[in-house]
Image: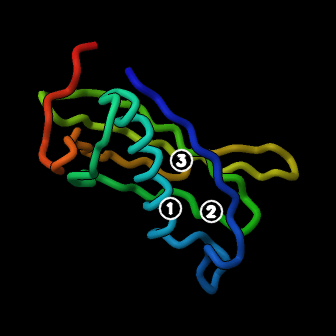
Amino acid sequence: MSEARSLEVVFPGDTNHLGSLFGGTLMAWMDRAAYFAASRRARGAVVTRKVDELEFRVPIHVGDFVEMVARVESEGRTSMRVVVEVHREDPADGTRELCTTGHFVMVAVGDDGLPIQLPAT
């Protein structure tokens, strides 16, 4: 199975008036992590077909480190289901907690943008 990790830090411009990370910003970070994992498996270009589920459990605040761990959990002929887990980390004391989980369907595509078969593993 293919895996990718990505790390971000939350700056004031990434947050709402309460100082917590915008959901859309987090979703973009998660989509990028899903892309990395799926692209590794496909050994080429992939696109996001859909987001099956996105669950925000714990808010993420200014200054937090945000780690996305994306893993290809299943695959079909041209598509892959990628789970992305998001952990927040307080850089001051190192405490971590799972904040968000999402499931992304990614599709391998050729130069023409059309789906192509995944290479053999």
Question: In terms of depth relative to the viewer, which is nearer, 27 or 109?
Answer: 109
**In the figure, 99 relative to 96: above or below?**
below
Question: In terms of depth relative to the viewer, which is nearer, 57 or 34?
Answer: 34
Q: Name which quarter of the figure residue 110 lies in.
A: top left
Q: Secondary structure at mark 1?
A: helix
Q: CA distance from mark 1 to mark 3?
A: 9 Å
Residue 70 location (% of width, % of height): 45, 37
Horizontal relation, residue 13 to residue 35: left or right: right
Give the amino acid type for the residue marked by disc 1 in the picture: Leu
Residue 36 location (% of width, % of height): 44, 40
Which label was assigned to residue 60? 2
Give the amino acid type for the residue marked by disc 2 in the picture: Ile
**In the figure, 51 relative to 77: above or below?**
below
> According to the image, label 3 marks what residue?
86
Question: In terms of depth relative to the viewer, which is nearer, 72 or 109?
Answer: 109
Residue 50 location (% of width, % of height): 22, 54
**Discs 1, 2 touching: Cβ within 8 Å:** yes
Q: Residues within 10 Å of mark 3 (few under 14, many from 20)?
A: many
> According to the image, label 1 marks what residue?
26
Residue placed farthest to the right in the image? 92
